[in-house]
Amino acid sequence: MWFYLVGALITGASPWVYDAASDFTIQINPALTGIWSYGWRENAVTGLHLYSTHFDKPFWGQRVIGWSMGGEQPRVALNVSGHTVEGPGIRIPKGRLCLYPGRGCEYSVVRWTCPASGHYRLSAQFEAFARATTDVHIVKNGGILGEEEIGNHGFAHDFSFESLDLKAGDSIDFVVGCGANRNYYGDVTGLSATFRRIP
């Protein structure tokens, strides 16, 4: 937590605002602050296997960084190129985070771990960046807070929780699976997620 507060003082960012894209890192998993971690699981709600492989490489000519399971899907990635990634049937806007389930329909997970007890406001959105037909979930300590089916390019679903009563160490997982068709092809799904601690 000390590292995060120092970083907030240097950058001018609020120490009580946490953003999945802005805070994304490939330096270490979980992140040095212990707040964000990236992994996969066999089902929507339980277990988390941390990704062990990070990457920094071009996708259709644009720089993308992320974490994966041995270099393959499932993965989580961030477009840091400053341009839109555009490929066959896929479009990832600049600065956007995305999750991709695995060949065996493994779920891709971004986890936020609460750094301090209190009330938090959560705004989140899942969006199809390709021909995605995914199931998406927000999970608190193994219990579903919200879930939805995402279908077709450009489809999005918003989640909003005005006051979550959280304890230090509670986990909120953002989870993407391969959907009812049990097919991972084209299932690139964008994630926007922001936590704000309520004074």
Image (cartoon, rainbow, N blue to C red):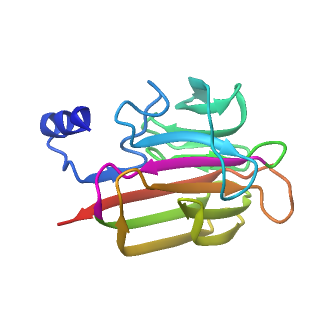
Residue displayed at 37% across by 58% down:
194
- Residue 197 image position (x, y, % from top left): 26, 61
Locate the N terminus and report the quarter of the image it occupies: top left
Q: Is residue 178 left or right of 64 when viewed as pictured?
A: right
Q: Nearer the viewer, residue 74 or 6?
A: 6
Q: Between residues 9 and 139, which one lies in front from this camera angle?
A: 139
- Residue visible at 14% across and 43% down in the picture: 12
Q: Can the viewer see residue 60? A: no
* Residue 25, picture quadrant: top left
Whether 120 is among the magenta residues is no
- Return the x and y of residue 167 as percentages of the image width and height: 35, 59
Please give the name of the residue rendered at 64% of the width and 63% of the height, measured from the top-left corner: 136
Residue at image point 56% right, 62% down: 139
Let me know if residue 187 appears in the view.
yes
Q: Position of residue 163 (x, y in %)?
A: 33, 74
| Rendered position, 72 above or below 106 | above
Q: Position of residue 147 (x, y in %)?
A: 62, 71
Chain part drawn in magenta: 106-118
User: Front-most of 125 and 17?
Assistant: 17
Q: Is residue 166 above or below residue 78?
A: below
Residue 113 lies in magenta, yes or no? yes
**Quarter of the rendering occupied by the C terminus:** bottom left
Frontmost residue, 128 versus 121? 121
Q: Is residue 76 above or below residue 125?
A: above
- Please give left or right for residue 98 compared with residue 94 in the image: right
**What main secondary structure does the magenta stretch of the protein show?**
strand
